[in-house]
Image (spheres, rainbow, N blue to C red):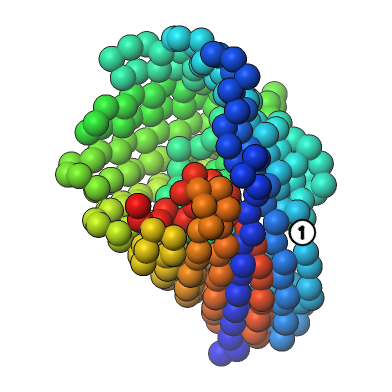
Amino acid sequence: MNKLLKTTLAVLLLATTALQAQIEINDNISVTGFVDMSVSKTDSEMTRSTSNSAAVNNAADADGSSGNLDQAEIDFILNFDKISGQVDLNYLGANDGEGKIGEFDLEQAFIRYDLGDGGDVEAGKFLSYMGFETFEPTGLYQYSYAYDIRNAIPGHHSGVRYNYNDDFLSLGLSLLDSVYRPDGGIQDSGHGVEAKIAIKPIEGLTIFLGFAQDSQDGAAEDSDLINFWTSYETGNITWALELNEYDFGAMNSGSQFLVMANLGLTDRTGLTFRVSEDAQDFKGGDTATKFTVSPNFSVNDNLGFLFELSQTDYGSEGTVTSLLSKRSSRSNPFGLST
């Protein structure tokens, strides 16, 4: 068997303090945001082929060097007692994945009405419930996402949803225009649904189970996703496990898993270990097993540096080695101990 080894060394350089800080315009409106930049060098020993899947050919094409402003975001936070909301404006650089390279985009815009007793209703364009790893790069413990073949975790979508949260239980039900529409926009045909339940039975432990189904006119089958993850924070260590099963129709189904540990070495330094796999379960499907080590250093609450070394084994197509440098900005970057 040929092997594809993808080695990634990533340095995350994050936004300025001013961009990360939340600025209060008045009692009802505040503004926050971040800037995300990266530098990368990739050496590929793979060969593009018409017999390869798109995921394998994308890895084969990853050869070269780049420096990118990956993302810049400005978020407007609205709070009018029982009515609140958020509007996120997003500049997407070379790694947006949705065909909007170098454009400003309305990432999300929703309003929320507080029903009291832990319940609320949201309407508009908002982020999916699914997935352990955060959608925004500033919330990741490492540079890359876990899965390299199929992006089964949805992003933003449009609809209405009900949420309930208390100290022990979290429930959610979304009625959507589409679970997987690439830009989260509204379309004339089809519908989707998401549901979640999460519990916190003891301090530091979260257990999450989610389901998503997308039904679109003209599609032979529905697209289904089951997402399970659990995380446990004890002292300065965070453990996480995720399992996904997806079925998007013929020749488009599979399973995914990740196991992660994040160790806060000091209040400014941390280290993340992750093992993940993305396996298609049909004849001729690809499998990618990924090993990731990611040390990080936080200069302050708004500026951090993150390094990543990843190795991805695709099985039979060759090797790819990448050296990347990237930023991360959020309050307490990388989940360091305090």
Q: Quadrant of residue 4?
A: bottom right
Q: Quadrant of residue 172?
A: top left
Q: Residue at x 78, y 73 (%)?
A: 65
As drawn, the residue found furthest toward the right would be 102
Q: Name the residue type under label 1.
A: Asn
- The relative height of residue 229 versus residue 296 in the rendered view (above or below) is above
Q: Is residue 87 left or right of residue 236?
A: right
Query: Residue 47: image x %, image y %?
Result: 75, 82
Q: Is residue 326 left or right of residue 242?
A: right
Query: Residue 115: image x %, image y %?
Result: 37, 11
- The relative height of residue 169 versus residue 245 in the rendered view (above or below) is above
- The relative height of residue 67 versus residue 201 in the rendered view (above or below) is below
- The relative height of residue 51 versus residue 251 in the rendered view (above or below) is below
Crowding near pointer 1: few (<14 within 10 Å), some, many (20+)? some
Q: Residue at x 58, y 86 (%)?
A: 3
Q: Residue at x 54, y 27 (%)?
A: 176
Query: Residue 18: image x %, image y %?
Result: 65, 40
- 149 or 127: nearer the eye? 127
Give the residue at mark 1.
68
Count every numbered label the image shows and give the total: 1
Q: Residue at x 66, y 67 (%)?
A: 325
Query: Residue 299: image x %, image y %?
Result: 53, 57
Q: Secondary structure at mark 1?
A: strand
Q: Is residue 315 left or right of residue 15?
A: left
